[in-house]
Amino acid sequence: MTVKNRRADLKKRKKTKEPLPTKIPEYETPIPFEETFKYVSSITFTADSYMKWIREALPLIKGMKVAKIGSSHDHNRKIGVQLGDDKIFYLRELPIYYYDYRYFFSDIKDRVARSSLYIVRSNSEGHVKFDDSVIIPVLANNNFKPWMSLTPNEVLTQRGAIRRAKGDVGMAGLGMGWAARKVLQRTKVKHLTIYEVEQPIIDFFGKSLLEDFGDRVSIVKADAYEVDWMQYDVALWDIWIEFGNANGDTKYEAIRDNMKANGKVCVGWGEGYSGSSSSRFF
């Protein structure tokens, strides 16, 4: 069944008040989402728990409209937040829907179907699903290709670096501020300085950090490659669009090697990952 036919059938069912399938396959056992979730190659979270976490992790989404899959870029741009000339922040729906498929003697009707999110750990790759529709906060380029998003993969791939934060910490890349917030919640961290090259990102996502953590955090508009990183005990880098792009970044590697040679910690997002590059959203 094509998307167009599925929508027409859905409209017809709603009109006749015919119930739609909502149950996920019996072999899936949804579990509550927690930032400490254990990696497995296939995992299903309850949508309610995930949405509760999203609202707590990124309270600025309150009141924002949600972009529907299939909507035009112009429509989504109107309900998103334009950040500078080349970035837009918006909420993307990850729906749960049904399909009706028939092929010769096969009859697969009214099965729940969903998009899945990509997760990686070390060099293992897996996927995440939800038992109902969720929304994903996305920071994208103007062509709506995700630059980053707040997903289970973001949590899974950041939390190891966050645990290493202590003393005076420098961070390359602000993003949506989730990782910075987790670093600042660590009692071992005296101060966090964040270097972000885009002022609109600082203005939009940095405001709540400054309000909540006061003089324990500084946000500086600067190119991370031009910073004196030797002033920090720990440096956390997250400036790449693909997981694993830290590998082969010679400028970053020179900074990392210099810090490590002097007994300091420097961690790059996806460093050491040898699988295929994966974006933050899919």
Image (cartoon, grey):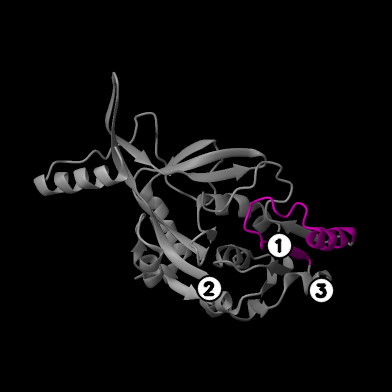
Q: Is residue 121 above or below residue 202?
A: above
Nearer to us in this view, 199 or 184 = 199
Q: Which residue is mark 2?
A: 205
Q: Quadrant of the N terminus?
A: top left
SS under mark 2: helix
For residue 225, say whether it is visible. Answer: yes
* Residue sitting at the far left: 16
For residue 55, say whether it is visible. Answer: no
Nearer to us in this view, 166 or 151 = 151
The location of residue 102, given as percent across then percent down, is 28, 27
Residue range in magenta is: 233-261
Tell me the number on the disc at residue 146: none
Q: Earlier in the sequence, mark 3 or mark 2?
A: 2
Instruction: From the viewer's perspective, tell me whether residue 1 is left or right of residue 164.
Output: left
Q: Which residue is mark 1?
A: 236
Q: Earlier in the sequence, mark 1 or mark 3?
A: 3
Q: Which residue is mark 3?
A: 228
- Any magenta on residue 59? no
The location of residue 61, given as percent across then percent down, is 41, 68
Tell whether label 2 touches label 3 (CB within 8 Å): no
SS under mark 3: loop
Identify the residue shown where x is 20% and y is 43%.
Answer: 9
